[in-house]
Image: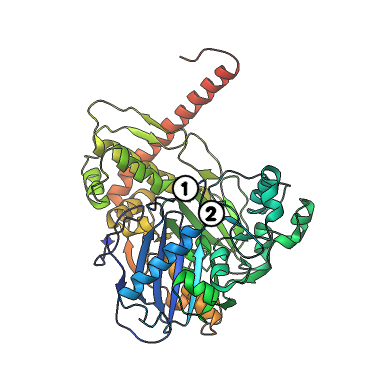
Amino acid sequence: MSHAAHGKGSPTGPAGEVGAPARAHAGTGLRLLCVDFGTSSIKAGVIDEEGRLRGWAHESLLDDPRADLVRWDPGLWSSHLKAAIEQLRAAGAIGAAGGGDLAAVVVSGNGPTIVPVGASGEPLSEAFLWIDRRELRPSRGASFYLPKVEWIRRNRPELYEKTASFLPFPEYLNFVLTGEKSAIVPSEEFVPYVWSGQEIAAAGLDGEKFPPFVRIGERIGRVTARGGEASGLPKGLPVVAGGSDFLMALVGTAAVAPGRTCDRAGTSEGINHCSSRPVRSERVRCLPHVIPGLYNAAGILASTGRIFEWFRTISGQREKSYQTMLEEILAVDHKARIPYFFPSLRIGETWEFSDAVFSQLEAEHGPAEMGRAVVQSIGFAVRDLIETLERHSCRIEQLRACGGQARNPLWNQMKADITGREIATPEIIDAELLGDACAGLVGLGERSSLADAAEGLVRIKTVYRPRPEEHERFGEAYERYRDLRRRVLRAVASAVDAQTAGGLVE
Protein backbone atom coordinates (compact mmCIF):
# COMPACT_ATOMS: atom_id res chain seq x y z
CA MET A 1 0.00 0.00 0.00
CA SER A 2 1.25 3.49 -0.75
CA HIS A 3 1.16 6.16 1.92
CA ALA A 4 1.77 9.16 -0.32
CA ALA A 5 2.01 12.73 0.89
CA HIS A 6 2.31 15.76 -1.34
CA GLY A 7 4.11 18.96 -0.41
CA LYS A 8 2.70 22.19 -1.80
CA GLY A 9 4.88 23.62 -4.50
CA SER A 10 7.42 20.80 -4.24
CA PRO A 11 9.33 19.76 -7.33
CA THR A 12 7.90 16.59 -8.86
CA GLY A 13 10.27 15.49 -11.60
CA PRO A 14 12.29 12.28 -11.61
CA ALA A 15 15.34 14.31 -12.56
CA GLY A 16 14.64 17.23 -10.29
CA GLU A 17 11.98 19.24 -12.11
CA VAL A 18 11.44 22.39 -10.10
CA GLY A 19 8.05 23.96 -9.71
CA ALA A 20 8.49 26.51 -6.92
CA PRO A 21 10.69 29.48 -6.02
CA ALA A 22 12.35 29.95 -2.65
CA ARG A 23 10.08 29.16 0.29
CA ALA A 24 10.26 30.24 3.92
CA HIS A 25 8.43 29.00 7.03
CA ALA A 26 8.02 30.41 10.50
CA GLY A 27 10.40 29.21 13.18
CA THR A 28 12.97 30.32 15.71
CA GLY A 29 16.29 29.13 17.09
CA LEU A 30 19.66 28.25 15.62
CA ARG A 31 19.73 28.18 11.83
CA LEU A 32 22.26 26.97 9.30
CA LEU A 33 22.62 27.79 5.62
CA CYS A 34 23.16 24.50 3.81
CA VAL A 35 24.16 24.47 0.15
CA ASP A 36 24.61 21.53 -2.20
CA PHE A 37 26.15 21.90 -5.66
CA GLY A 38 25.04 19.25 -8.12
CA THR A 39 26.26 18.98 -11.69
CA SER A 40 23.18 20.70 -13.08
CA SER A 41 21.87 22.82 -10.23
CA ILE A 42 22.35 24.31 -6.78
CA LYS A 43 20.03 23.62 -3.86
CA ALA A 44 20.19 25.86 -0.81
CA GLY A 45 18.25 25.47 2.41
CA VAL A 46 17.97 27.13 5.78
CA ILE A 47 17.64 24.36 8.38
CA ASP A 48 17.14 24.73 12.13
CA GLU A 49 18.62 22.69 14.97
CA GLU A 50 15.62 20.33 14.92
CA GLY A 51 16.13 19.44 11.27
CA ARG A 52 13.24 21.54 9.94
CA LEU A 53 13.58 23.15 6.53
CA ARG A 54 12.83 26.86 7.01
CA GLY A 55 13.60 28.01 3.50
CA TRP A 56 14.61 26.46 0.19
CA ALA A 57 15.96 27.79 -3.09
CA HIS A 58 17.07 26.30 -6.39
CA GLU A 59 19.37 27.65 -9.10
CA SER A 60 19.86 25.92 -12.44
CA LEU A 61 23.46 25.87 -13.63
CA LEU A 62 23.01 24.29 -17.05
CA ASP A 63 20.50 26.93 -18.12
CA ASP A 64 23.26 29.51 -17.87
CA PRO A 65 24.58 30.23 -21.39
CA ARG A 66 28.13 30.10 -19.99
CA ALA A 67 27.68 26.50 -18.83
CA ASP A 68 29.93 23.97 -20.56
CA LEU A 69 30.58 20.64 -18.85
CA VAL A 70 33.95 20.29 -20.60
CA ARG A 71 35.10 23.90 -20.07
CA TRP A 72 33.46 24.69 -16.75
CA ASP A 73 33.89 28.27 -15.51
CA PRO A 74 34.34 28.16 -11.69
CA GLY A 75 32.72 31.59 -11.53
CA LEU A 76 29.37 29.95 -12.28
CA TRP A 77 29.34 28.42 -8.83
CA SER A 78 29.83 31.62 -6.87
CA SER A 79 27.48 33.72 -9.03
CA HIS A 80 24.65 31.20 -8.74
CA LEU A 81 25.34 30.73 -5.02
CA LYS A 82 24.82 34.47 -4.62
CA ALA A 83 21.58 34.25 -6.61
CA ALA A 84 20.30 31.40 -4.41
CA ILE A 85 21.08 33.39 -1.28
CA GLU A 86 19.20 36.35 -2.72
CA GLN A 87 16.20 34.06 -3.27
CA LEU A 88 16.30 33.00 0.37
CA ARG A 89 16.63 36.58 1.53
CA ALA A 90 13.69 37.69 -0.62
CA ALA A 91 11.57 34.89 0.87
CA GLY A 92 12.48 35.95 4.41
CA ALA A 93 14.44 32.78 5.21
CA ILE A 94 17.59 34.88 5.70
CA GLY A 95 17.41 38.20 7.51
CA ALA A 96 17.47 41.38 5.48
CA ALA A 97 20.60 42.39 7.40
CA GLY A 98 22.55 39.99 5.22
CA GLY A 99 22.34 36.68 7.03
CA GLY A 100 23.56 37.73 10.48
CA ASP A 101 20.87 35.48 11.96
CA LEU A 102 22.67 32.41 10.59
CA ALA A 103 24.91 30.34 12.86
CA ALA A 104 27.08 28.86 10.07
CA VAL A 105 27.20 27.89 6.41
CA VAL A 106 27.96 24.36 5.21
CA VAL A 107 28.65 23.43 1.57
CA SER A 108 28.60 20.03 -0.14
CA GLY A 109 29.03 19.20 -3.80
CA ASN A 110 29.89 16.92 -6.67
CA GLY A 111 33.23 15.23 -7.06
CA PRO A 112 35.88 14.20 -7.79
CA THR A 113 36.31 17.67 -9.30
CA ILE A 114 39.56 19.68 -9.39
CA VAL A 115 40.14 23.44 -9.69
CA PRO A 116 43.70 24.73 -10.40
CA VAL A 117 44.20 27.90 -8.32
CA GLY A 118 46.99 30.49 -8.61
CA ALA A 119 49.14 32.06 -5.89
CA SER A 120 46.73 34.99 -5.46
CA GLY A 121 43.71 32.71 -5.20
CA GLU A 122 42.29 33.05 -8.71
CA PRO A 123 41.21 30.02 -10.76
CA LEU A 124 43.76 29.53 -13.55
CA SER A 125 41.59 27.51 -15.92
CA GLU A 126 38.30 25.71 -16.25
CA ALA A 127 37.35 23.30 -13.50
CA PHE A 128 37.91 19.63 -14.28
CA LEU A 129 34.52 18.16 -13.36
CA TRP A 130 33.95 14.64 -12.10
CA ILE A 131 32.46 13.69 -15.49
CA ASP A 132 35.47 15.10 -17.36
CA ARG A 133 37.32 12.22 -19.01
CA ARG A 134 40.62 14.10 -19.13
CA GLU A 135 42.55 12.06 -16.61
CA LEU A 136 45.55 9.77 -16.52
CA ARG A 137 46.13 7.43 -13.62
CA PRO A 138 49.76 7.95 -12.60
CA SER A 139 50.01 4.73 -10.63
CA ARG A 140 47.89 1.90 -9.32
CA GLY A 141 46.77 4.14 -6.48
CA ALA A 142 43.27 4.70 -5.13
CA SER A 143 42.96 8.48 -5.59
CA PHE A 144 40.02 9.79 -7.60
CA TYR A 145 41.69 13.22 -7.96
CA LEU A 146 45.33 12.63 -8.87
CA PRO A 147 44.52 11.19 -12.33
CA LYS A 148 43.15 14.61 -13.31
CA VAL A 149 46.23 16.37 -11.95
CA GLU A 150 48.50 13.98 -13.81
CA TRP A 151 46.62 14.68 -17.04
CA ILE A 152 47.17 18.40 -16.50
CA ARG A 153 50.88 17.89 -15.89
CA ARG A 154 51.31 15.77 -19.01
CA ASN A 155 49.10 17.74 -21.38
CA ARG A 156 49.15 21.29 -20.02
CA PRO A 157 52.51 21.63 -18.27
CA GLU A 158 52.34 25.42 -18.16
CA LEU A 159 49.09 25.21 -16.18
CA TYR A 160 50.60 22.64 -13.82
CA GLU A 161 53.63 24.86 -13.13
CA LYS A 162 51.55 28.00 -12.51
CA THR A 163 49.13 26.21 -10.14
CA ALA A 164 49.75 26.98 -6.48
CA SER A 165 47.03 24.61 -5.26
CA PHE A 166 44.79 21.95 -6.74
CA LEU A 167 41.54 22.35 -4.84
CA PRO A 168 38.84 19.68 -4.79
CA PHE A 169 35.18 20.59 -4.93
CA PRO A 170 33.27 21.74 -2.84
CA GLU A 171 36.45 22.84 -1.07
CA TYR A 172 36.98 25.44 -3.78
CA LEU A 173 33.76 27.17 -2.67
CA ASN A 174 34.95 27.07 0.95
CA PHE A 175 38.15 28.73 -0.24
CA VAL A 176 36.18 31.46 -2.04
CA LEU A 177 34.29 32.12 1.20
CA THR A 178 37.15 31.93 3.71
CA GLY A 179 40.47 32.14 1.86
CA GLU A 180 41.46 28.88 3.59
CA LYS A 181 42.63 25.96 1.46
CA SER A 182 41.61 22.45 2.47
CA ALA A 183 40.64 18.97 1.34
CA ILE A 184 37.81 17.24 3.22
CA VAL A 185 37.85 13.62 4.38
CA PRO A 186 35.34 11.93 6.68
CA SER A 187 37.99 9.71 8.30
CA GLU A 188 41.58 8.53 8.01
CA GLU A 189 40.38 5.51 6.02
CA PHE A 190 39.20 7.84 3.26
CA VAL A 191 42.54 9.62 2.74
CA PRO A 192 43.83 7.33 -0.07
CA TYR A 193 40.71 8.03 -2.13
CA VAL A 194 41.43 11.77 -2.06
CA TRP A 195 45.24 11.71 -2.10
CA SER A 196 47.94 10.33 0.12
CA GLY A 197 51.47 11.63 0.49
CA GLN A 198 52.78 8.28 -0.72
CA GLU A 199 50.73 8.36 -3.93
CA ILE A 200 51.64 12.00 -4.60
CA ALA A 201 55.33 11.14 -4.20
CA ALA A 202 55.04 7.96 -6.29
CA ALA A 203 53.54 10.00 -9.13
CA GLY A 204 56.32 12.56 -8.92
CA LEU A 205 53.87 15.37 -8.20
CA ASP A 206 54.65 18.43 -6.08
CA GLY A 207 53.19 17.84 -2.63
CA GLU A 208 53.08 21.58 -1.92
CA LYS A 209 50.31 21.93 -4.48
CA PHE A 210 47.87 19.84 -2.42
CA PRO A 211 46.08 21.42 0.57
CA PRO A 212 45.88 19.89 4.07
CA PHE A 213 43.00 17.71 5.21
CA VAL A 214 40.09 18.68 7.42
CA ARG A 215 37.29 16.45 8.67
CA ILE A 216 33.59 16.76 7.97
CA GLY A 217 32.15 18.86 10.78
CA GLU A 218 35.32 20.88 11.39
CA ARG A 219 35.30 24.66 11.24
CA ILE A 220 37.31 25.79 8.23
CA GLY A 221 37.22 29.50 8.92
CA ARG A 222 34.94 32.51 8.58
CA VAL A 223 33.54 34.37 5.60
CA THR A 224 35.97 37.11 4.60
CA ALA A 225 35.08 40.49 3.12
CA ARG A 226 36.05 39.10 -0.29
CA GLY A 227 33.97 35.96 0.32
CA GLY A 228 31.03 38.06 1.38
CA GLU A 229 31.21 40.12 -1.79
CA ALA A 230 31.29 36.96 -3.90
CA SER A 231 28.42 35.26 -2.09
CA GLY A 232 26.25 37.87 -0.42
CA LEU A 233 26.94 36.35 3.01
CA PRO A 234 27.99 38.45 6.02
CA LYS A 235 31.64 38.78 6.94
CA GLY A 236 32.54 36.64 9.94
CA LEU A 237 29.97 33.87 9.39
CA PRO A 238 31.53 30.50 10.40
CA VAL A 239 32.10 28.01 7.59
CA VAL A 240 31.92 24.32 8.56
CA ALA A 241 33.22 21.50 6.35
CA GLY A 242 30.52 19.54 4.55
CA GLY A 243 31.80 17.04 2.00
CA SER A 244 31.03 15.10 -1.14
CA ASP A 245 27.33 15.11 -1.97
CA PHE A 246 26.91 11.33 -1.83
CA LEU A 247 28.44 11.18 1.65
CA MET A 248 26.19 13.94 2.94
CA ALA A 249 23.16 12.15 1.47
CA LEU A 250 24.02 9.10 3.59
CA VAL A 251 23.93 11.30 6.68
CA GLY A 252 20.81 13.13 5.49
CA THR A 253 18.85 9.85 5.18
CA ALA A 254 20.36 8.39 8.38
CA ALA A 255 21.88 5.53 6.39
CA VAL A 256 24.49 5.49 9.15
CA ALA A 257 23.87 2.06 10.69
CA PRO A 258 24.58 -1.38 9.20
CA GLY A 259 21.73 -2.57 7.00
CA ARG A 260 20.31 0.81 6.05
CA THR A 261 20.37 1.71 2.36
CA CYS A 262 20.17 5.09 0.66
CA ASP A 263 18.88 5.40 -2.93
CA ARG A 264 20.24 8.77 -4.06
CA ALA A 265 18.65 9.52 -7.41
CA GLY A 266 18.72 12.58 -9.64
CA THR A 267 20.63 12.89 -12.89
CA SER A 268 22.51 9.78 -11.76
CA GLU A 269 21.69 7.23 -9.09
CA GLY A 270 23.51 5.29 -6.42
CA ILE A 271 22.24 2.43 -4.25
CA ASN A 272 24.37 2.94 -1.12
CA HIS A 273 24.28 0.19 1.50
CA CYS A 274 25.80 0.70 4.94
CA SER A 275 27.87 -2.38 5.73
CA SER A 276 29.86 -3.44 8.77
CA ARG A 277 32.46 -5.07 6.52
CA PRO A 278 34.06 -4.33 3.13
CA VAL A 279 32.46 -5.84 0.01
CA ARG A 280 34.63 -6.98 -2.88
CA SER A 281 33.03 -7.27 -6.31
CA GLU A 282 33.59 -5.94 -9.81
CA ARG A 283 30.06 -4.53 -9.78
CA VAL A 284 30.13 -2.98 -6.30
CA ARG A 285 32.08 0.15 -5.43
CA CYS A 286 33.05 -0.18 -1.78
CA LEU A 287 34.49 2.80 0.05
CA PRO A 288 34.85 3.72 3.71
CA HIS A 289 31.60 5.12 5.07
CA VAL A 290 31.24 8.64 6.39
CA ILE A 291 30.91 6.94 9.79
CA PRO A 292 34.35 5.56 10.83
CA GLY A 293 34.52 1.78 10.95
CA LEU A 294 31.66 1.24 8.51
CA TYR A 295 31.64 0.82 4.73
CA ASN A 296 29.53 2.13 1.86
CA ALA A 297 28.84 -0.65 -0.64
CA ALA A 298 27.35 1.03 -3.69
CA GLY A 299 25.97 0.16 -7.07
CA ILE A 300 26.23 3.12 -9.45
CA LEU A 301 23.70 3.96 -12.16
CA ALA A 302 25.35 6.92 -13.83
CA SER A 303 22.50 8.08 -16.03
CA THR A 304 19.00 7.21 -14.76
CA GLY A 305 17.58 10.73 -14.54
CA ARG A 306 19.52 11.76 -17.61
CA ILE A 307 17.88 8.95 -19.61
CA PHE A 308 14.38 10.07 -18.65
CA GLU A 309 15.25 13.67 -19.51
CA TRP A 310 16.67 12.52 -22.85
CA PHE A 311 13.50 10.60 -23.64
CA ARG A 312 11.37 13.56 -22.64
CA THR A 313 13.27 15.67 -25.16
CA ILE A 314 13.40 13.29 -28.12
CA SER A 315 9.71 12.40 -27.73
CA GLY A 316 8.71 16.07 -27.89
CA GLN A 317 7.39 16.18 -24.32
CA ARG A 318 9.57 18.92 -22.85
CA GLU A 319 6.50 21.00 -21.98
CA LYS A 320 4.77 18.06 -20.33
CA SER A 321 5.27 17.52 -16.59
CA TYR A 322 6.96 14.39 -15.30
CA GLN A 323 3.81 13.55 -13.37
CA THR A 324 1.65 13.63 -16.52
CA MET A 325 4.22 11.60 -18.46
CA LEU A 326 4.28 8.91 -15.79
CA GLU A 327 0.49 8.83 -15.62
CA GLU A 328 0.39 8.15 -19.38
CA ILE A 329 3.17 5.57 -19.12
CA LEU A 330 1.41 3.72 -16.29
CA ALA A 331 -1.87 3.78 -18.22
CA VAL A 332 -0.36 1.40 -20.80
CA ASP A 333 -2.00 -2.00 -20.33
CA HIS A 334 0.46 -4.34 -18.64
CA LYS A 335 -0.60 -7.04 -21.14
CA ALA A 336 0.25 -4.85 -24.11
CA ARG A 337 3.28 -5.75 -26.20
CA ILE A 338 5.78 -2.96 -25.59
CA PRO A 339 9.36 -2.58 -26.78
CA TYR A 340 12.44 -3.15 -24.64
CA PHE A 341 15.06 -0.50 -23.95
CA PHE A 342 18.66 -1.31 -23.03
CA PRO A 343 20.45 1.91 -21.96
CA SER A 344 23.83 0.21 -22.02
CA LEU A 345 25.35 -2.93 -23.45
CA ARG A 346 28.18 -2.80 -20.94
CA ILE A 347 28.22 -4.54 -17.57
CA GLY A 348 30.66 -3.21 -15.02
CA GLU A 349 31.07 -1.13 -11.90
CA THR A 350 28.88 1.64 -13.27
CA TRP A 351 25.80 1.54 -15.49
CA GLU A 352 26.01 4.30 -18.07
CA PHE A 353 23.84 5.61 -20.91
CA SER A 354 26.03 4.33 -23.74
CA ASP A 355 25.43 2.15 -26.83
CA ALA A 356 21.70 2.10 -26.11
CA VAL A 357 19.27 -0.14 -28.01
CA PHE A 358 15.49 -0.32 -28.47
CA SER A 359 14.38 -3.87 -29.27
CA GLN A 360 11.07 -5.10 -30.67
CA LEU A 361 10.00 -1.55 -31.51
CA GLU A 362 6.92 -1.50 -33.75
CA ALA A 363 5.21 1.20 -35.82
CA GLU A 364 2.23 1.27 -33.49
CA HIS A 365 4.36 2.10 -30.47
CA GLY A 366 4.12 5.71 -29.37
CA PRO A 367 5.64 7.85 -26.59
CA ALA A 368 3.69 6.07 -23.83
CA GLU A 369 4.86 2.56 -24.84
CA MET A 370 8.43 3.73 -25.46
CA GLY A 371 8.37 5.68 -22.21
CA ARG A 372 7.25 2.61 -20.30
CA ALA A 373 10.17 0.69 -21.80
CA VAL A 374 12.57 3.44 -20.70
CA VAL A 375 11.17 3.72 -17.16
CA GLN A 376 11.05 -0.06 -16.70
CA SER A 377 14.69 -0.33 -17.76
CA ILE A 378 15.63 2.06 -14.96
CA GLY A 379 13.59 0.15 -12.39
CA PHE A 380 15.04 -3.15 -13.57
CA ALA A 381 18.57 -1.75 -13.22
CA VAL A 382 17.81 -0.79 -9.61
CA ARG A 383 16.45 -4.29 -8.94
CA ASP A 384 19.52 -5.85 -10.53
CA LEU A 385 21.81 -3.80 -8.28
CA ILE A 386 19.84 -4.80 -5.19
CA GLU A 387 20.22 -8.46 -6.16
CA THR A 388 23.94 -7.95 -6.78
CA LEU A 389 24.41 -6.37 -3.34
CA GLU A 390 22.38 -9.10 -1.67
CA ARG A 391 24.57 -11.78 -3.27
CA HIS A 392 27.33 -10.18 -1.21
CA SER A 393 25.37 -10.41 2.06
CA CYS A 394 24.04 -6.85 1.91
CA ARG A 395 20.43 -7.52 2.84
CA ILE A 396 18.15 -4.68 1.69
CA GLU A 397 14.60 -4.40 2.99
CA GLN A 398 14.04 -0.69 2.44
CA LEU A 399 15.49 2.03 0.22
CA ARG A 400 15.65 5.49 1.76
CA ALA A 401 15.12 7.55 -1.38
CA CYS A 402 16.32 11.11 -1.84
CA GLY A 403 17.11 13.47 -4.69
CA GLY A 404 15.02 14.74 -7.58
CA GLN A 405 13.53 11.40 -8.59
CA ALA A 406 12.24 10.77 -5.07
CA ARG A 407 9.85 13.72 -5.39
CA ASN A 408 7.56 11.81 -7.71
CA PRO A 409 5.07 9.56 -5.85
CA LEU A 410 4.12 7.59 -8.98
CA TRP A 411 7.76 6.71 -9.64
CA ASN A 412 8.36 5.81 -5.99
CA GLN A 413 5.42 3.40 -6.05
CA MET A 414 6.50 1.91 -9.37
CA LYS A 415 10.02 1.42 -8.04
CA ALA A 416 8.63 -0.32 -4.94
CA ASP A 417 6.53 -2.61 -7.15
CA ILE A 418 9.49 -3.45 -9.41
CA THR A 419 12.05 -4.07 -6.67
CA GLY A 420 9.79 -5.60 -4.04
CA ARG A 421 11.31 -3.27 -1.44
CA GLU A 422 9.84 -0.43 0.56
CA ILE A 423 10.71 3.03 -0.69
CA ALA A 424 10.90 5.53 2.18
CA THR A 425 11.21 9.26 1.56
CA PRO A 426 12.36 11.69 4.26
CA GLU A 427 10.83 15.07 5.07
CA ILE A 428 13.78 16.78 3.39
CA ILE A 429 14.12 15.14 -0.03
CA ASP A 430 17.38 16.99 -0.75
CA ALA A 431 19.11 14.85 1.86
CA GLU A 432 22.51 16.43 1.17
CA LEU A 433 21.16 19.61 2.77
CA LEU A 434 20.15 17.82 5.97
CA GLY A 435 23.52 16.03 5.96
CA ASP A 436 25.16 19.46 5.77
CA ALA A 437 23.03 20.60 8.71
CA CYS A 438 24.22 17.60 10.72
CA ALA A 439 27.84 18.54 9.95
CA GLY A 440 27.12 22.12 10.94
CA LEU A 441 25.63 21.10 14.29
CA VAL A 442 28.70 18.98 14.99
CA GLY A 443 30.95 21.93 14.10
CA LEU A 444 28.99 24.22 16.43
CA GLY A 445 29.18 21.71 19.28
CA GLU A 446 25.42 21.07 19.26
CA ARG A 447 25.78 17.36 18.40
CA SER A 448 28.44 14.87 19.39
CA SER A 449 28.80 13.13 16.01
CA LEU A 450 27.33 12.87 12.52
CA ALA A 451 25.56 9.64 13.48
CA ASP A 452 24.06 11.27 16.57
CA ALA A 453 22.86 14.22 14.51
CA ALA A 454 21.39 12.03 11.76
CA GLU A 455 19.48 9.80 14.17
CA GLY A 456 18.01 12.88 15.84
CA LEU A 457 17.14 14.95 12.77
CA VAL A 458 16.08 12.58 9.97
CA ARG A 459 12.35 11.92 9.83
CA ILE A 460 10.71 9.56 7.32
CA LYS A 461 7.59 11.16 5.86
CA THR A 462 6.25 8.64 3.35
CA VAL A 463 6.63 4.89 2.86
CA TYR A 464 5.68 3.20 -0.44
CA ARG A 465 5.12 -0.53 -0.07
CA PRO A 466 5.21 -3.02 -2.97
CA ARG A 467 1.82 -4.28 -4.10
CA PRO A 468 2.01 -8.09 -4.44
CA GLU A 469 0.08 -8.35 -7.71
CA GLU A 470 2.08 -5.57 -9.39
CA HIS A 471 5.35 -6.98 -8.05
CA GLU A 472 4.53 -10.37 -9.58
CA ARG A 473 3.77 -8.77 -12.96
CA PHE A 474 6.97 -6.76 -12.93
CA GLY A 475 8.89 -9.85 -11.83
CA GLU A 476 7.78 -11.73 -14.94
CA ALA A 477 8.67 -8.75 -17.14
CA TYR A 478 12.04 -8.49 -15.39
CA GLU A 479 12.94 -12.09 -16.20
CA ARG A 480 11.96 -11.59 -19.87
CA TYR A 481 14.03 -8.40 -19.94
CA ARG A 482 17.12 -10.10 -18.50
CA ASP A 483 16.84 -13.02 -20.90
CA LEU A 484 16.55 -10.76 -23.96
CA ARG A 485 19.41 -8.56 -22.72
CA ARG A 486 21.69 -11.60 -22.47
CA ARG A 487 20.81 -12.56 -26.04
CA VAL A 488 21.38 -9.00 -27.30
CA LEU A 489 24.75 -8.88 -25.52
CA ARG A 490 25.79 -12.17 -27.10
CA ALA A 491 24.73 -10.94 -30.54
CA VAL A 492 26.64 -7.67 -30.14
CA ALA A 493 29.74 -9.47 -28.88
CA SER A 494 29.60 -11.85 -31.83
CA ALA A 495 29.27 -8.93 -34.28
CA VAL A 496 32.22 -7.13 -32.72
CA ASP A 497 34.34 -10.27 -32.89
CA ALA A 498 33.45 -10.70 -36.55
CA GLN A 499 34.33 -7.06 -37.29
CA THR A 500 37.62 -7.40 -35.46
CA ALA A 501 38.44 -10.50 -37.47
CA GLY A 502 37.74 -8.61 -40.70
CA GLY A 503 34.42 -10.31 -41.40
CA LEU A 504 31.27 -8.64 -42.71
CA VAL A 505 28.43 -7.93 -40.24
CA GLU A 506 24.98 -7.93 -41.77
Between tags 1 and 2, which lies in front? Answer: 1
Whether residue 69 is situated above or below residue 454 in the rendered picture: above
Residue 151 appears in view:
yes
Whole-number angstrom distance, CA of label 1 to CA of label 2: 29 Å
Residue occupied by mark 1: 68
Whether residue 324 is situated above or below residue 343 in the rendered picture: below
Compared across the picture, whether 247 is left or right of 321 comes to: right
Residue 253 appears in view:
no
Residue appearing at x 37%, y 59% in the figure: 423
Tell me the amino acid under the disc marked 2: Ala
Q: Exactly how many numbered labels are in the figure?
A: 2
- Sequence-wise, which precedes: disc 1 or disc 2? 1
Give how far across and how far down residue 389 sits, in percent: 52, 51
Which quadrant would residue 374 be assigned to in this image? top left
Which quadrant would residue 196 be assigned to in this image? bottom right
Give how far across and how far down residue 123 sits, in percent: 58, 58
Q: Quadrant of the N terminus?
A: bottom left
Tell me the amino acid under the disc marked 1: Asp
Q: Label 2: state its secondary structure.
A: strand
Q: Quadrant of the C terminus?
A: top left
Compared across the picture, whether 193 is left or right of 269 comes to: right
Residue appearing at x 48%, y 72% in the figure: 229
Compared across the picture, whether 282 is left or right of 35 comes to: right
Q: Label 1: state its secondary structure.
A: loop
Residue occupied by mark 2: 298
Give how far across and how far down residue 402 sits, in percent: 40, 61
